[in-house]
Amino acid sequence: MGSRGRCQRMALLAFLLLSLPDAIRAQHVVNKFAYDALIGSQEAIEAGQIAEARAILETLREKEARLNDHEKALLYQSYGYLEAAEERYPEAIAHLETCLAQNALPEAGQLQTLYNLSQLYLATERFPEAVKSLSRWLRDTKDRPPDALYMLAAAYYQHGERKKALTPAILAVREAEKPKEAWLQLLLSLYVERQEYEKARPVLEKLTQLYPKKVYWMQLAAVYGELGQENESLAALELAYTQGLLDKDDELRRLARLYIYHELPYLGARVMEKGLAGGIVEPDSEAYEILANAWMRAREFDRAIDPLSRAASAAEDGKLYLRLGQAYAEKEDWGAAAAALKQAIAKGGLDDPGTASLLLGVALFNQDQLASARPHFVRAAQHEKTGKDARKWIKLIDKAQRGGAGADVDEAGGGATVGS
């Protein structure tokens, strides 16, 4: 048995014992010998002297014929608490059921015992009985404490009656000044199962406020995403990050991508750099690509070069080499751009081969390698997207090769322009 289970059982027993002295003293019709035995057994239970408590109750039970109904009810109630102290819950339940069957306790005592019995039903996973007894208790009691409402919701939930669990779960959270974590968790589960994310959102907001754990921040970000509230989703992840709660590779990648999506690429780059440096983010092609994308979106092309080179060399196709060539072109480093673009074409798998050919032609042209540039413009001219610009570059090269001294790059109509 784990320490958590022992703590829960001790808490249950302590709660059960609270009602016993009042129940014993509530009636003046308890004989002195019965009163002394009942009080003595209770004190022994509280002191952990279980054997002594049992011996006292056995002595009283031998005189059961002399007991009135009220005393018998108290005897079985005491037995119930004794068995609970030894974690013999089935026996405890049987004794409390016998106690209630006497129907001899005052109304408050009957209700308290019924409530205690309900707890034992729930603890032993006898959910139908827990539902029945709790429903009866809530019907007859003048109070409606949030604890009881939560117990009823939990019993319904564990019994598979999710729809019936919803109302008491809502009331338990609503009527508590500070809802317990388990109560909010149950209500959240019910809403998420029903895909009622708009209703789940305030529950998660309350969880992050009262019990700020990583799991709730992540769930809140996901719910915001489901609701299309992307700014709020980013804010939730950002708050978790600033609290040091994001400590997994995929979490940092997700945050970085959101920063880039929301046009905050510098922040995305810093997240990835810190994650890579700290060993949280795996240094693979995708990670370096995210980092490079962030720096390129931030127009920090110098800082994009290294991660993009790493990503491109590990990639299976040439797409990232194309991006690398674009980054070098932005820096007007035409030699490096040409080398990267040749790698892109050689690796293949490009979504836009026309752009790669066009940009390689531009890189070679700017190194005065006109003859080498022309075939790449010819290939680019075969693609609809780049055909118009490529033909302008071909005309420019042909004019220059014919000795046209007035030839100018501007005549290409902006064909040298590259994007990120």
Image (spheres, helix red, strand yellow):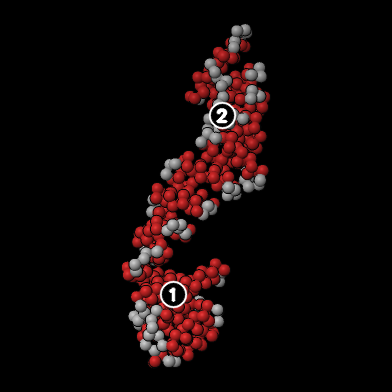
What type is the residue that disc 2 sits on?
Ser
Decide which of 116, 42 is in the foreground and name it: 42
* Of pointers 2 and 1, the one earlier in the residue sequence: 1
- Where disc 2 sits, the SS reads loop
Decide which of 247, 120 is in the foreground and name it: 120
Residue at 42% in and 80% down: 25
Label placed on residue 60: none
Residue 369 location, x and y as percent? 65, 18
- Reply above or below: 295 against 157: above
- Where disc 1 sits, the SS reads loop
Residue 320 location, x and y as percent? 59, 34
Residue 418 location, x and y as percent? 56, 24
285 left or right of 107 in image: right
Say which residue label 2 marks: 420
Say which residue label 1 marks: 19
Which of the two marks, 2 or 1, is nearer to us in this view?
A: 1
For label 2, count other residues whose C-alpha is less than 10 Å away and answer few (under 14), some (14-19) or many (20+): some
Residue at 63% in and 40% down: 273
Q: Is residue 115 visible?
A: yes
**Mark pair 2, 1: CA separation:** 74 Å
Residue at 46% in and 74% down: 18
- Dividing the image into 4 quarters, which one contains the C terminus? top right
58 left or right of 361 in image: left
Residue that extends furthest to the left in the rendered view of this protein: 139
Decide which of 279, 221 is in the foreground and name it: 221
- Dividing the image into 4 quarters, which one contains the N terminus? bottom right
Q: Is residue 162 visible?
A: no
Quarter of the image where one finds residue 101: bottom left
What type is the residue that disc 1 sits on?
Ser
